[in-house]
Image (spheres, grey):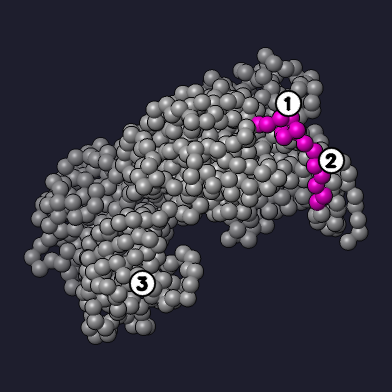
Amino acid sequence: MRLSPVSQHLLVFISVLSLSITTATAWTAPVIFYPFGSAAGDTQVLETGSETSAYVAFSTPFKFFGRTYSHTYVNNNGLLTFNQALPEAQPNIFPMFGSRDFIAPLWADLDDISIGLYSYQEYTNGSVLTRATQDINQYYPQMNFNASWVFVATWDFVLTSNITVLNLHLAPAITFQVILISGGGYYFILMNYGDCVAISISVEAGYDTIDSTDYYRIHYSSNGNYLPNLKNTTNVNVPGRWAFPVNDRPAPEIFYPFGSAAGDTNNTAADDGSSSVIQLLSPFPFFGRTYQQIYVNNNGHLTFNQPSSQFVPYSFPARGSQDVIAGLWTNLDNSARGVVSYHQYTSGNVLTRATQDINTQFPNLNFTASWVLVATWNKVAYFNLINTETSFQVVLISGGNFSFILMNYGDIAVTAHPVQAGYDTINSTHYFVIPGSINGSFISNLRNSSNVKVPGRWVFRVDGGPGNSKTLPYDPCYNYTVLDDLRRATDNQLQSSYYAQYTSKLLCDTDVNWVGWYRLFIRGQSVQMPDTCVDQLSCGTHAPLWLNGQHPKIEDGVVTRSVCGHWLNNCCYFQSNPIKVKACPGGYYVYEFVRPVGCYLAYCAAPAIFYPFGTAAGDTNNAAVDDGNSSVIQMLSPFLFFGRTYQQIYVNNNGYLTFNQASNEYVPYSFPASRSQDVIAGLWTDLDNRQRGVVSYRQYTSGNVLTRATQDINSQFPNLYFTASWVFVATWNKVAYYALTSTETSFQVVLISGRNVSFILMNYGDIAVTGHPVQAGYDTISSTQYFVIPGSINGSFISNLRNSSNVDVPGRWIFRVDGGSKSNNEYITGLQVKLSSFSDLSDTGNIEIVLQQIKQELVKYGLPNSIELKLRKVQKIKP
């Protein structure tokens, strides 16, 4: 029964202790789990060592990527199937390109290593639907979703060598769920993971569809040794949970037919792979050269003479030795997700459609298509960003000695990988770069851009014949990339000055090389560039970007102007390339960066929270070595770290500190790891200071840095009356991620000690997103103490580190880490909480949920994960 909200008081006593759970302690499911088992009314199947499955008829049909199912089979080996039971022991690797749909929360031969229960239940009303509604709206807030049906399947296994069936209520070795949710024409899957021990047999987690038109593999889930980490992984920032919409999303109408229904040939699912040579059924002229063959490369580009495994595009014009057509050349990975396919046509409706499309744009040619090749990248992931999907097509069309390219764009995910869309010829006698396509942060706009007033489509004539224009007429008033500047402005300067300052920061600080037309916005207002400059060609104190003379009128067309340098945030920038500007109907202007912008940086101040670093601070630099580290650093003062005293330390290039030995690990393990070393991770990930950035360090035993450290610690721990006697500052300044050379990430780890008390400060500046595994916090030997900074295990969210804190100082986290005496680390305090709840807080199960939620909040603000919450009293009061 749904209760009316009531105000209730909880008096919670928090004891900061290391918890130990014995086999005599009853096990409770993780908070993220939906209700299951006998208490929830599930249908249960006891698994004792044979391959079994259960047929379940749905009261409400469930759609899975375009196919509608009225039933499912719950298989003992951790998967759902629809057309037939499949209690197969050996999992297949996705994508299978098979004839069945699979949902596999954890497909493995579980009955070989364990015994237990699997259970299931269907819901059409009640609190489970309320919970599902809340979850989906949290992850997909734009949908305004309302769940009307939920199906929960749970696998709850124990190891046969460790425990008997009679003790199944105790902590299981492997436990996970899959939840099917539907409502209002939308369909979703949730996968929840609890404790999963490492196993040596084959495993697979994710989903796969008929012909693998849609599939997903949870990262590293095919490695049985990785299973204990599943409870910490997520794609929705909720540890242990993965969420997927499974509606069939039709391709955009502008797409030509593709996929198995169109008879396509699929490329092999191989990172950096390509098709075999494709013999063209009709010669294709390309700017004076005629080709009889082509290759469709998995990384989003076509080549003629040889396949290409190049995953980092070179910039057009490259003046190279090959012709290239780049739909979206970047580091794609169809081995993780998506399908790359192609098909040639010499008759039929596709030729009719191509004829109409070309004649619409070139009405004077009276063109008739005789041959079409359609290459499609459908929902392909970026490398190491397997939850992304990107869809586009390159269509080659020829007939009567004319040839054309169509590029069609669907959903394009943003990425930090280098990108390039357009075409380039041998020696770059002809080339074109689609505006905005060299910036991974802006390429999602490709589905709305066009040079033919058809959103998502670009058309080019490429035969190179007499009188041929290499591209269609391009009107920048209708074809441009929008730069909507949402960065904070803190004063009342003119909007144009806002633009000049923040755009220049964007151009220089992140080395963005713009080519193409842009319409500029600040706070929703179209920007007109200023016409004045202080100290032309120098760094004036307030000099904006500058244009000689007045702005053009509409009748002037495109006008070329020059710009000058200026100061910004203690950075001196100089930019001497021309800018084109055009006045457009409606009173706005568009601007073109004619060629990549050249910026020169004289000096740039770090964030104010950063301690001094770099050459000016006398730092020692680590060698520029991928996965390298410092030599051993002998500390000038002992450092206490949770009961152990260290005299030495190593600064590892991949973003973390170790004490006993250096480390070249570039894939962080998840905390708590229960390993044999102490680790302090500012941002442990696959960094590469060979490509960009500097890793450096310095110790201090006197001077201003100690004064600053003393003040910082006393502001947070005023009762300690602390005085710093030693400070160690390690800085990663504008370091790139491996294979993502355009990225920059800056952070510090500061160790502070004095009078047998020790602290860690972590300071965060600009942190680029990444698809690499990441981890920030600390972990100790056997994980007696550990902390994970919230959000720091998801590379898509870590840019928020510069705004996060446990001490109300954006970008800074502080931890006391000496371990101290018992009185310092085991204490009891009272916390009175007033809350409104729809749950009955006199129910023990509901209380446990609330306590876990409170614990998560306390941990978020700096208490260790080992805190123990004990309920002293619950008091219900009238509102």
Q: CA distance from mark 3 to mark 2?
A: 60 Å
Identify the amino acid type marked 3.
His
Q: CA distance from mark 2 to mark 1?
A: 18 Å
Q: Nearer the viewer, residue 238 or 749?
A: 749
Residue 415, position as x, y percentages in the image: 40, 50
The residue singled out by tag 3 in the image is: 542
The residue singled out by tag 1 in the image is: 20
Q: Of marks 2 and 1, which one's residue comes earlier in the chain?
A: 1
Q: CA distance from mark 3 to mark 1?
A: 61 Å
Q: Residue furthest top?
A: 161
Residue 553, position as x, y percentages in the image: 27, 85
Residue 543, position as x, y percentages in the image: 33, 72
Segment tinted magenta in the rendering: 819-833
Q: Is residue 825 magenta?
A: yes
The residue singled out by tag 2 in the image is: 871
CB-based contact (under 8 Å), mark 2 and mark 1:
no
Q: Of marks 3 and 2, which one's residue comes earlier in the chain?
A: 3
Identify the amino acid type marked 2.
Leu
Left or right of residue 39, residue 631 in this image: left
Q: Nearer the viewer, mark 3 or mark 2?
A: 3
Please determine whether, in this image, residue 312 is positioned above or below residue 85.
below
Please determine whether, in this image, residue 462 is positioned above or below residue 304.
below
